[in-house]
Image (cartoon, helix red, strand yellow):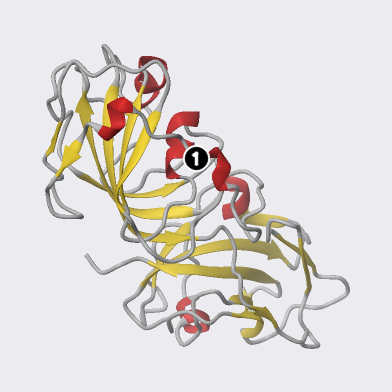
Amino acid sequence: MRKSLALTLSAGLLVALAGCSGAPAAPDCSKVTPSGGASSIVTADGAIGADPAATFPFPLVVEKAQASVLTEGEGDPIGIGGTIAGSYTIYDGESGQPAGATQATALVVSEGLPAGLRNALLCSTAGQRTVVVLPNDEATQIVAGAPGSIVMVFDISAAFPQAADGDTQPAQSGFPGVVHADDGRPGVTIGSLTAPDEAKSALLKKGDGAEIATGDTVVVQSTAVSYSTREVTSSTWEDGTPGVWTMTEDTAAASAGQPAGISEFLVGQTVGSEVLAVVPDGSGSATAYVIDIVGVLPAS
């Protein structure tokens, strides 16, 4: 079995197009991939978050995807567009052997995933271990050249919604207007505002989750709009990939896609909050950032 991974199933980040979906609403768990004889026969007795040491009689072959929850999680289930963090291990259904080592991942549960895998992860919760058995037509989208079915074991350490779900706060004057689509995606209107001389921020939604601290790795949705052009300059919503930002006191340091100095507006806020930050560029313009804090990655 070849071990090249066709869906960017990497040690750092697994992503796929998230698109536009109704994350603030309760997820439709009726679509979850059903359990079956193949998925229920897989055992995985290894520690959660480590090598699951899965075993099963082989060859293990399915015509349709199957999924079984081996360990129940807790907390709110995620819908389409939500993100899971944790690890996964892939096994060759023909030989029963691992197709590589256990990998850490942050994965958007999106329409871009094979349907069997997407629906197997739908409604997942933190702490859950799930076995997924995929037929060959879906397996080859995950592992190039897979000769038959594959078995995947997912350990989910955290599950995050698509958008901030905190309580809406009163609007503040002097800031761009922000409205939201049904899925939580923000729309920003600069209007006749001029760029400020100093950076400032306003709280749009107040969450009731953990307080963000320096050093945390935060999962965010972010939209940036230029004061000069009134156009969106970057958007994780459009990219289909939430940002993974490290909170640092060094204003010159930033994770990939993270605006330098943005940490000062997020540290001290709570998970579930949405923050509007306006940052001047020193050239007479500014950028407005609408940032949804959807979660904090567990410390590795």
152 and 184: which is toward the camera: 152
The image position of residue 53, as x and y in percent, is 11, 41
> Going by the image, does 119 lie left or right of 146?
right
Q: Is residue 251 above or below residue 222?
A: below
Quadrant where the C terminus is found in the figure: bottom left
Residue that lies at the very extreme toward the right in this rendered image: 192
Residue 114 visible somewhere in the drawing: no
For the residue labelled by badge 1, is the local secondary structure a helix, a strand or a loop? loop
Report the residue at 30% width, 24% height from top. 143
Amino acid carrying mark 1 in the image: Val
Q: Is residue 191 above or below residue 268?
A: above
- Name the image quarter holding residue 54: top left
Residue 124 visible somewhere in the drawing: yes
Report the residue at 45% width, 83% height from top. 267
Residue that lies at the very extreme toward the top in this rendered image: 147
Q: Which residue is mark 1?
A: 32
The image position of residue 235, as x and y in percent, is 61, 55
Quadrant where the N terminus is found in the figure: top left
The image position of residue 252, as x and y in percent, is 40, 74
